[in-house]
Amino acid sequence: MAIGVGGSTPEAELAAMSSMRCNAQAIGAGERRARLARACALMREQGLPALWLDVSTSLTYFTGIRLNRSERLHGAVLLADGELVYVSPAFEVEKLRTMLTIDGPVAAWEEHEDPIALLVETLAARGITGGPLALDEATPFVTVDRLRRIGPAFDLVSAGPITTACRLHKSPAELALMQTAMSITLAAQQAAARILREGITTTEVQHFLVAAHQHLGAEGPPAFNIVLFGEATAYPHGVPYPQTLKPGDMVLVDVGAPVDGYVSDLTRTYVFGEPTARQRVWGRVPSRGVAGR
């Protein structure tokens, strides 16, 4: 048996785990304000009076708000002068206010109203009636198309030069969160290898990985959780049926979980039992683990 594979139980592994979250602190309002200030400085340099943040990782990066995308317009407008205006369905406003770490007015729209018209009116009330308008790269086409129709005076451009320039350089706090996310998943991967036994199913290992990430301090269950045995490991994005572990099987585990929005992504592949000559040759090829965003 390969070193570190088998010999333990899920119960023993979970009992030995403790949270790793003390290794990193959540991103605070002060850092988010600094991010917004950096974005505004870039906007002024590039002559962009306003930037629309749709429901996306960029919205979370700058404001801390995490929303689920739906058919309803939801997001925020960042003005080059630093003002942040949230746009929300009226029935979501109270929930939105509980999420705010960066203050700003909320422009609300009722179900019978046109949210794109409200967005255009919100900009007009601040003296922006045309010219360049930067759009979050994640903005849906339906929003872009409607903006073209209602606000033809706007020159719609990608916000990528702003958002990417800000997000590309990670702060010490971000790096600590990314490292913690990866450390949590590495520990979960190692524990998952130790619980393997002949007859265990991929479903059992997946359930263990969910519990392990929670015990180790991830903020939620794995964002993805792929466990494959034997022939199925040739299909690295998974197959829709469980497998049962047999001696000599290849094992592939691809899993990651969030820590304050930073998601780990770590894949490990190894042999359960004694590897064949062919597997030993394959095992000399380096494998890679990919860090979270």
Image (spheres, rainbow, N blue to C red):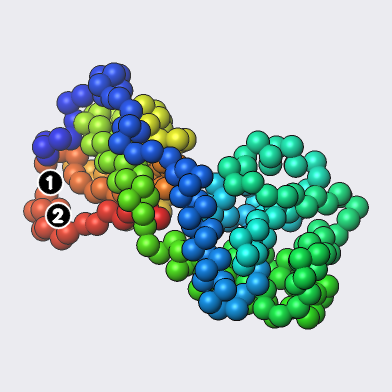
Q: Which mark is residue 275?
A: 1
Q: Quick check: marks 1 and 2 in contact, CB under 8 Å?
A: yes
The residue wearing badge 2 is: 283
- How far is disc 1 from disc 2 in space, using C-alphas? 9 Å
Three-letter residue code for mark 2: Gly
What residue is at 49 percent from the left and 63 percent from the top?
A: 38
Identify which residue, 76 or 255, lies in the foreground.
76
Decide: few, some or many residues near mark 1? Use Cα within 10 Å; few <14, some 14-19, many ≥20: some
Q: Which of pointers 1 and 2 lies earlier in the amino acid sequence?
A: 1
**Residue 48 appears at what percent x and percent y?**
62, 75
Residue 219, by quadrant, is top left
Residue 15 as seen in the image, left or right of residue 211: left
**Residue 212 appears at what percent x and percent y?**
35, 30
Most extreme residue toward the front, as rendered? 81
What residue is at 25 percent from the left and 29 percent from the top?
A: 195
**Residue 63 appears at what percent x and percent y?**
57, 50
Three-letter residue code for mark 1: Pro
User: Is residue 99 shown to the viewer in this render?
Assistant: yes
Identify whether 137 is placed above or below 223: below
Identify whether 203 is placed above or below 90: above
Identify which residue, 192 or 160, lies in the foreground.
160
**Residue 225 appears at what percent x and percent y?**
41, 42
**Of labels 1 and 2, the one closer to you:** 2
